[in-house]
Image (cartoon, rainbow, N blue to C red):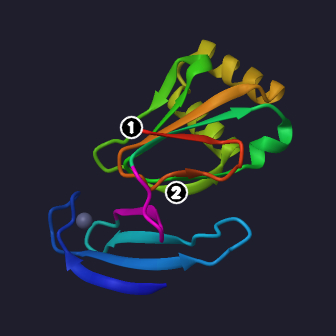
Amino acid sequence: MKKLAKHLFCPVCKKHGLSVSEHIIDEPQFFPEGIIEIHYKCESCGFSATDVYPLKKGKPSKITFKVESLDELGVRVVKSSTATLTIPEIGGTIKPGEIAEGYITNVEGVLERFEKVFASEPAALSKLRQLKQEANFTLVLEDPGGNSRILSAKAVSEPI
Ligand SMILES: [Zn+2]
């Protein structure tokens, strides 16, 4: 982990306690182009967040991935802080918030995040669990920043 900057303005407590560090993920079998993970941490209020950037910047894109087998729940997903995730089958969307995070996960991890977002909606929750069991649904990742990826040859990327 390499420290890039410190004493930056913190968006939460508004003091100059934010430090930024980077960590290069070197796992060529998953990320042939290389991924940088950025960590933000505020020494003043404890706020912390992460974001991810491929070393090779992409274009604004909409990536669609049709999940058709349980194996595909393991497909890696790089979701940058500017991306919106949608599962059309439940009509559900996770939009970037004011202090959005970027992260690396897999398709199953994306479903778990949807389960948290829709925790108070029993109908959406049971549909999510059914989709996961049947491994039959679509994941749409729309990123105007161009930094998101779904690491499968089956994923279809279109410019936006
Ligand atoms: Zn702070």
Q: Position of residue 142 (x, y in %)?
A: 45, 39
Q: Position of residue 85 (x, y in %)?
A: 50, 36
Q: Which residues are magenta?
A: 47-59
Binning the other alpha carbons within 10 Å of mark 1 as few (below 14), some (14 to 19) or many (20 upward) gives: few
For the residue marked with disc 1, what is the amino acid? Ile
Task: Using the image, determine if residue 61 lies above or below residue 4.
Answer: above
Task: Using the image, determine if residue 31 lies above or below residue 105.
Answer: below
User: What residue is at 68 percent from the left and 43 percent from the top?
Assistant: 107
Q: Circle 2 is placed at which residue position?
A: 103
User: What residue is at 33 percent from the left and 84 percent from the top?
Assistant: 4
Determine whether the residue tagged by mark 2 lies in a helix, strand or loop. strand
**Residue 139 falls in image quadrant:** top right
User: What residue is at 64 percent from the left and 21 percent from the top?
Assistant: 125
Q: Circle 1 is placed at which residue position?
A: 160
Q: Is mark 2 within 8 Å of ligand 1?
A: no
* Residue lying furthest bottom: 2
Question: In the visual, does 99 lie left or right of 38?
Answer: left
**Residue 28 falls in image quadrant:** bottom right
Ligand 1 located in image quadrant: bottom left
**Residues under labels 1 and 2: Cα distance?**
22 Å
Task: Using the image, determine if residue 108 lies above or below residue 104.
Answer: above
Quick check: marks 1 and 2 in contact, CB under 8 Å? Answer: no
Q: Position of residue 105 (x, y in %)?
A: 62, 53
Placement of the C terminus among the 4 image quadrants: top left
